Amino acid sequence: MSGDETSGGVDFGARRVPEGEKAPLVRGVFDSVARRYDLMNDLMSGGIHRRWKADMVVWLKPQPGQVLLDVAGGTGDIALRALPRLDRGMVVVCDASERMLEVGRARALDEGILTGIEWLCADAEGLPIADRSVDLYTIAFGLRNVTRIAAALAEARRVLKPGGRFLCLEFTPEITPLLQPLYDLYSFQIVPLLGRIVTGDREAYAYLVESIRRFPRQSEFGEMIRRAGLDQVRFRNLTGGVAALHSAWRL
């Protein structure tokens, strides 16, 4: 399932819930793991997520003076990588979890970053951002957690200026067949166990693994981006298709 609304509710990991219940449930997941979220990312991926995010910023090519909206960016991973390239520009970090934003704010302060970045608690499906006001829209490992993917993509197009860039980094449900059995074992057995040990919340990481399997395949997601009115859609697989970058433009 794509995560979009249906008469039978929406996906929350491996189960279906009423549409109105998903956003609070997801927010609860990230509130629960916020303090150890970055550590868990390192442990789960062996640090590979850092390379993926670096690749994302390189492909994004932020330019001085641009405005970047980083959605689901709570702990600041993408924002803090992009900010040095935005000389005299700015980043708005948007996340539905205030606790994730608290971690991001503290991280920025620890790095001595006091200007050029704003923190906004809001939902990807209803951004309090003016039409055609941002040059760049990024979302990393967040789109699979929204209630209605199509609505979030429509918001991305709405806030982008003509000529603006959309870039999404997300896990994919299918990887290289030779890796699939090992990947399944690791995802469904090891990751939830790590979640329990490191964050005290096994169920949060069971949900996050299950949500990957409910996300559209790369070509299907690309078609959703096109239907939202974005153009020049392309994607790149990363690490045998474990994750993918999808790029598009508002023309």
Image: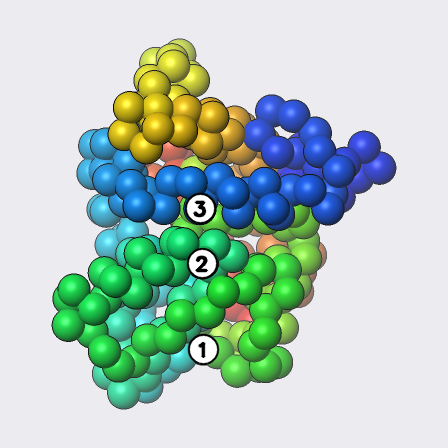
Residue 31 marker: 3
Which label's residue is closer to the chain start, 1 or 2? 2
Q: Is residue 131 left or right of residue 79?
A: right
Quadrant holding the C terminus: bottom right
Q: Give whichever of 47, 75 is nearer the camera.
A: 75
Q: CA distance from mark 3 to mark 2?
A: 7 Å
Would you say the residues marked 3 and 2 are in contact, meaning their CB atoms lie under 8 Å apart?
A: yes
Q: Is residue 30 left or right of residue 47?
A: right
Q: Give whichever of 37, 184 is nearer the camera.
A: 37
Give the vertical position of 181 relative to 73 (above or below). Answer: above
Q: Amino acid at mark 3?
A: Asp
Would you say the residues marked 1 and 2 are in contact, meaning their CB atoms lie under 8 Å apart?
A: no
Secondary structure of the residue carrying numbered label 2: helix
Q: Residue 26 at what x, y percent from top left?
A: 55, 43
* Residue at (67, 49) in percent of width and height: 148
Secondary structure of the residue carrying numbered label 3: helix
Q: Amino acid at mark 1?
A: Asp
Secondary structure of the residue carrying numbered label 1: strand
Specify whether residue 76 is in view.
Answer: no
- Nearest to the eye among marks 1 and 2: give it: 2
Q: Amino acid at mark 2?
A: Glu
Which label's residue is closer to the chain start, 1 or 3? 3
* Residue at (34, 19) in percent of width and height: 193
Q: CA distance from mark 1 to mark 2?
A: 25 Å
Which label's residue is closer to the chain start, 3 or 2? 3
Residue under numbered circle 1: 135
* Residue at (31, 56) in percent of width and height: 103
Residue 98 marker: 2
Q: Give whichever of 28, 225 is nearer the camera.
A: 28
Q: CA distance from mark 1 to mark 3?
A: 29 Å
Q: Residue 157 at what x, y percent from top left?
A: 60, 69
Q: Residue furthest right?
A: 7
